[in-house]
Amino acid sequence: MNEKILVIDDEESILASLADILEDEGYQVITAKTAQNGLEEIKKDTPDLLILDVWLPDLDGLKLLKSLRKDYPELPVIVISGHGTVETAVRAIKLGAFDFLEKPLSYDRVVVTVANALKFRALKQEYISLKKSLSGPRITGKSQAIRQLQEALEKVAQTDATVLITGESGVGKEVAARTVHALSRRKDGPFVAVNCAAIPEELIESELFGHERGAFTGALSAKKGKFDLANGGTIFLDEIGDMSLSAQAKVLRVLQEKCFERVGGTRTINVDVRVIAATNKDLKKEIAAGKFREDLYYRLNVVPIHIPPLRERPEDIPLLVEEFLEEFAKHSGLGRKKISEEALAALKQYHWPGNIRELRNLIERLVIMSRGNIITLDDLPQEFQRPSQTPPPEEPWFKCDDFKTARHLFEREFLRRKLAEYNGNISQTAEAIGLERSYLHRKLKSLGLAGEN
């Protein structure tokens, strides 16, 4: 129990008594005698709970409460008063106080009320986290690649191992990360997602590790970083290949030592966080170019998971389409639409450069813009109609007259695609396609294809 409680009261005896009893219960207690000093403490490092007296020398406590509800809506507040009336209590509750306690305080009741307020705060945060986790798409599909992915996610979720998820943009890397978190022992803790590519380089360290007041221009108050907020749970570092080298060094330290300092601070903060990273870049090329730390790569790549692009698993498209049609039927108010076999066939032939994200956006557009209850081929954009009107090009081995040449061409293309799917890793490719590693290595060499161990 490390929750921090701030008590604002102008009576020294009240501050001392509350500090003693709450510290005995395992809480960290900070005290302030004025509203101004209390506000400074809140800006410095937001507490988990505030106990606030109504009568303060510099400001009415209920006015401070009203202000805090705007700036710190998630901060639970217990109001106390030695001149309490029913009207004061009602007003405090209407302004958003968790409870109102009258002086002289019953310390048993204080302990119970504090525990209830913190429990309510935790439940509220859990509800918000759960709502977010259920609002997005799930790992959906029936292809062998997706079945293998689901199996891998279930296995790694039972451990605390660091995971590196690779794949093209839009394949569902964050969904995979959320799945690992939801299946892990950390599922009741927070899941904090950070898009490293969307944060300016000069702000990434502050965003990840927080900062102290005055650490830089504009740092008017202390701020917790994403690693701090993810304590006890999982942090998802999306597009980690875009992170600055200085921030990479700090992430490496967190992985090695489970601690960090805030920007502008000297206090070491210990955290218990599982790290899941993701990228659509080739990190080995980034290492060769001097843009990514090799030691960080090996720390992140404990369990590599690759998500294949949608074009390599067209058999998953019908299931995804049905899922999105169901989702948008609930949110659009336009009713549950269906899709024709011809339209579905066209979707399965499309290349999908934007992967699942592109498919989801298209289905949303079709639900809104299609006139009837059935989405037809005519409702699709022009680029989706071309494949159904033109037969697909023949594979080169079908043009061969002799069996040996056709088999050679097929084997080479099949292994080239599978090797690319597993990022050139021979061992993983061999396991996936049911061959001995040594045999696959010799076969790749004979076909002029290269891979890595």
Image (cartoon, rainbow, N blue to C red):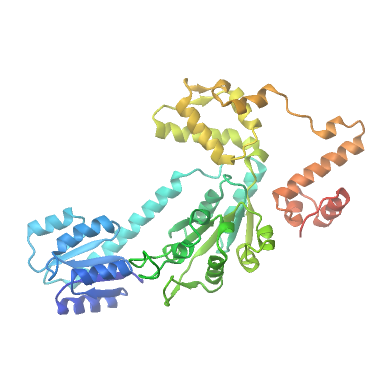
Residue 49 in the image: x percent, y percent?
27, 65
Which quarter of the rendered picture does the C terminus lie within? bottom right
Q: Nearer the viewer, residue 261 or 134?
A: 261
Residue 434 seen in the figure? yes
Q: Is residue 441 above or below residue 248?
A: above
Residue 441 in the image: x percent, y percent?
83, 55
Q: Which of 329 and 43 is in front in this view?
A: 43
Q: Nearer the viewer, residue 184 or 374?
A: 374
Q: Indicate left or right for 223 with 31 as reference.
A: right
**Quadrant hosting residue 253:** bottom right
Q: Indicate left or right for 350 with 443 as reference.
A: left
Residue 262 in the image: x percent, y percent?
43, 71
Q: Indicate left or right for 371 with 219 as reference.
A: right
**Quadrant hosting residue 353:** top right
Q: Indicate left or right for 134 with 423 as reference.
A: left
**Quadrant hosting residue 378:** top right
Residue at image location 19% in from the left, 76% down from the top: 15
Q: In this view, does 451 lie above or below 49?
A: above
Residue 317 in the image: x percent, y percent?
60, 35
Residue at image location 79% in from the left, 51% down from the top: 435
Residue at image location 31% in from the left, 59% down from the top: 121
Q: In this view, does 126 lie above or below 378?
A: below
- All told, the count of numbered labels is 0
Which quarter of the rendered picture does the N terminus lie within? bottom left
Residue 184 seen in the figure? no
